[in-house]
């Protein structure tokens, strides 16, 4: 799997772009990287903009995915997950199911700009 993780808004929002094929093992590695490099040092919840527009193959083994991403989804610094763009319906459903399982807010948003506007609007209200 090809992916890119970077701050979209420093210490507030991560942009995770995924492309090509992915496996359960890829999601485990990605989960550890986000937890270690972004969430472990956070003092406030970090939102994730998830762009799977160019992801061609997604693992559909829900129980295996659940076990490898549980630390990420249960991390106290994880905010909401915002899926942007055109998402494979089954992949979107699995991500949403994982989020619901771990009580993480997950929303579908048309594009990155709208996701950033939501983050800005929510931050201003607090």
Image (spheres, grey):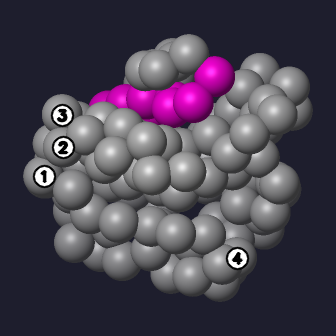
Mark sitting earlier along the chain (4/2): 4
Q: What is the distance, in whole Å, between disc 1 and disc 2 at their CAs? A: 7 Å
Q: Secondary structure at mark 4?
A: loop
- The overriding secondary structure of the stretch rendered in magenta is strand
Q: Identify the residue at horizontal 18%, vertical 34% (top origin).
A: 113
Q: Is residue 66 visible?
A: yes
Q: Secondary structure at mark 1?
A: loop
Q: Identify the residue at horizontal 80%, vertical 63% (top origin).
A: 74
Q: Secondary structure at mark 3?
A: helix
Q: Which residues are the magenta region?
A: 11-21
Residues 25 and 53: in front is 53
Q: What is the distance, in whole Å, between disc 1 and disc 4 at their CAs? A: 24 Å
Q: Identify the residue at horizontal 48%, vertical 43% (top origin).
A: 123
The numbered disc on residue 114 is 2
Location of mark 4 (residue): 102
Mark sitting earlier along the chain (1/4): 4
User: Looking at the image, do the residues carrying marks 3 and 2 touch, with CB atoms under 8 Å apart?
Assistant: yes
Location of mark 3 (residue): 113
Q: Nearer the viewer, mark 1 or mark 3?
A: 3
The numbered disc on residue 110 is 1
């Amino acid at each position: 799997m090809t992916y890119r993780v970077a701050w979209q808004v420093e210490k507030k929002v991560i942009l995770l772009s995924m492309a090509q094929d992915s496996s359960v093992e890829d999601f485990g590695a990605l989960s550890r990287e986000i937890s270690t490099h972004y969430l472990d040092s956070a003092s406030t919840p970090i939102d994730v903009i998830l762009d799977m527009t160019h992801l061609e193959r997604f693992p559909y083994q829900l129980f295996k995915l659940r076990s490898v991403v549980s630390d990420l989804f249960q991390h106290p610094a994880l905010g909401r997950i915002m899926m942007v763009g055109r998402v494979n319906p089954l992949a979107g459903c699995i991500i949403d199911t994982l989020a619901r399982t771990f009580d993480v807010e997950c929303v579908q948003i048309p594009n990155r700009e709208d996701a950033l506007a939501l983050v800005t609007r929510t931050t201003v209200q607090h």
